[in-house]
Amino acid sequence: MKKLLLLLLFSALYKQSFCWGFFAHQRINYYAVFLLPPEMMVFYKPNIQFISDHAVDPDKRRYAVAAEAPRHYIDIDNYGQYPWKELPVKYEEAIKKYSEDTILANGIVPWWIQIMQQRLTNAFKQKDAAKILKLSAEIGHYIADSHVPLHVNSNHDGQTTNQKGIHGFWESRVPELLAEKQFDFMIGKAAYIPDIQKYVWDRVRESGAASDTVLKDEAMLTKQFSSDTKYSFEERNGKIARQYSSAFTIAYNKMLDGMVERRMRLAISSVASFWYTAWVNAGQPNLKNIKKTAFTQEDLKEFENLNNAWRDNVIKGRLP
Ligand SMILES: [Zn+2]
């Protein structure tokens, strides 16, 4: 009975833990708003609640749409060694070389971000407030995912190295425990990105390169902890659950020498810079008069469907 209970607790924890965790995604979009110039702030600030809340829509969509999952990651180690120059950066060339099935199976986050950026730029051109908000919230999610080392490694949850759970540990447990108390979110200003394709691939390569350290350090630290000090029953989101202990989490963060904070800060800065770049490329439309947002019936239905699919809790495609 006790075993069953533990298993249930652990699978509940496991289910929640993918993609920076809801907490970090929402914080990343939230803080990104403050990096924008006043001409954009005038529109984003009154809508900051929406931009933060809907940062997690792409994760909810994974429960509803099978094609969603590959948009969140790329198993770049399946294409050889760092810096993975064999893999063409252009989608058409990549599928020509490896087949579309292979490319989709290994994940498409760097290409998907560029598609979303095009859509956001068009929304700015059309001055469509609802679209701008939806796309800003959602592109923030994919950009943030591309900054997570374990979103750029086929051993994404330590499944081949007996480190299951490490995915949520790095991107949910560490920021949830430490971000508000210790991380510094004073981050300069959004900057124009002259070459989106290069920028996306630079971040992805950094993440891929860091993923080894993420895995190795956890394995090394595990040797210094007994299993009942590595894990503990502690409160999370108002519930007591078995999870990585505070002591283990703090030690891991120290061992990584601030990597989680650095990637989170960079994610915030990247998200703001993508929004800013889309706005500039659309000709800097005046956002003062589009403060009022009218979501279509279709939008509202989609939000509801996403929430229902998420509550039903059956994920389509791979986890995490
Ligand atoms: Zn995600």
Image (cartoon, rainbow, N blue to C red):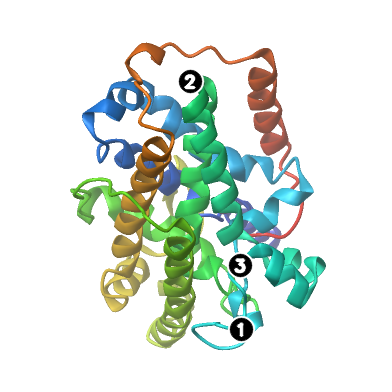
- 45 or 217, which is in the foreground? 45
Residue 304 can be seen, yes or no: yes
At label 1, which amino acid type do we have?
A: Glu
Q: Residue at x 45, y 85 (%)?
A: 216
- 100 or 32, which is in the foreground? 100
Residue 20 can be seen, yes or no: no
Mark 2 and ligand 1: say if the CB distance to the nearest ligand atom is below 8 Å: no
At label 2, which amino acid type do we have?
A: Ala
**Mark 2 to mark 1 CA distance (whole Å):** 40 Å
Residue 129 shows which numbered tag? 2
Q: Position of residue 155 (x, y in %)?
A: 61, 77
Q: Which residue is mark 3?
A: 74
Q: In what quadrant of the picture does the C terminus appear?
A: bottom right
- 182 or 291, which is in the foreground? 291
At label 3, which amino acid type do we have?
A: Ile
Q: Secondary structure at mark 2?
A: helix
Q: Position of residue 28 (x, y in %)?
A: 37, 45
289 in relation to 111, above or below:
above
- The image shows a total of numbered marks equal to 3
Residue 86 shows which numbered tag? 1
Task: Classify mark 2: residues with Cα within 10 Å, few (<14), some (14-19) or many (20+).
Answer: many
